[in-house]
Image (spheres, rainbow, N blue to C red):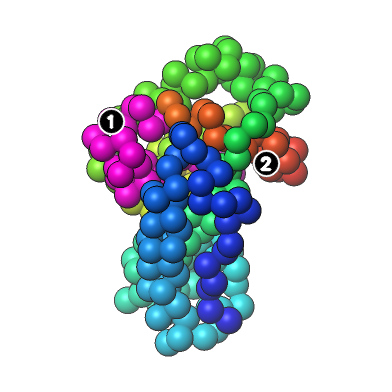
Amino acid sequence: MNYLLPSLPYAYNALEPHFDKKTMEIHHIKHHQAYINNANTVLATYPELAKYSVEELIQNLDIVPNDKRILMRNNAGGHANHSFFWQNLKIGTTLSGYLKITIERDFGSVIQFKEEFERIAGARFGSGWTWLVLQEDKLVIVSTANQDNPLMGEAITGVKGIPIIALDVWEHAYYLQYQNKRLDYIKAFWNVVNWDQAATRFALKK
């Protein structure tokens, strides 16, 4: 089976005014679809890889033939990251419960957590992602380049962990609305984090 573009669980304008409709539409049907198309060219040549989910594949990139490994790292990674990102967004949820307690334990306070997340996201040079991940029993903020995902492992990306939330800091994710003001985009993210989904992920991985 080829990878398919997942439908968004909301309308393109559902995250306004924080994430604008036009950016969400282009980001979804142009950028995400391009990663899928590129990954599917490899699946067409190596159909035995299609039995793996995209998450399984990026965790086991050594099963990809060497001459296609970087292509799949970038494009299967892009598909996995964006599929996660869309589920990671929703207006109106609240950080609470055990996830909030653990964030306060590991970062000192929710404010300190947000400040550290913003600092790391703002410091990512070029394109990449910022993640809140679970490393064993501790929450940690990490950053990955390009379309790398913490699930790929420390040997490949330099980081590890199970993703709980993620922010896309590629310019295509924000430039139409925020131009070069990445920090404004990062701060807007707090208005659209799907904390309910994050809490569910956290509970399942504990």
Query: What residue do we see at 34% from left, 27% from top?
Result: 183
* Residue beneath the point at 52% across and 28% down: 190
Within 10 Å of the Cα at label 2, are there few (<14), some (14-19), or many (20+) other Cα atoms? some
Q: Residue 197: which numbered mark, if any?
A: 2
Instruction: Give the amino acid at mark 1.
Output: Lys
- Examine the structure image and report whether residue 114 is included in the region drawn in magenta: no
Residue 189, x across and y down, in percent: 48, 32
Please give left or right for residue 107 compared with residue 115 in the image. Answer: right
Q: Is 184 one of the magenta-colored residues?
A: yes
Q: Amino acid at mark 2?
A: Gln
Residue at horizontal 38%, vertical 68%?
34
Tell me which corner region of the image, top left, top right, bottom left or bottom right, holds residue 100: top right
Residue 173 in the image: x percent, y percent? Answer: 37, 46
Q: Quadrant of residue 40?
A: bottom left
x then y, percent, for residue 141: 48, 31
x%, y% of residue 8? 58, 56
Q: Residue at x 60, y 68 (%)?
A: 53
Secondary element under disc 2, as helix, strand or loop, is helix
Instruction: Give the quadrant of residue 102.
Output: top right
Query: What whole-number distance in Å separates the C-alpha atoms at marks 1 and 2?
Result: 27 Å
Relative to residue 138, is residue 84 depicted above or below?
below
Quarter of the image where the N terminus is located: bottom right
Magenta stretch?
A: 161-186
Residue 158, numbered label: none
Label 1 close to label 2 by CB (< 8 Å): no
Answer whether residue 199 is visible to the viewer in this image: yes
Name the front one of labels 1 and 2. Answer: 1
**SS for dot 1:** loop
On the image, numbered disc 1 is attached to which residue? 181
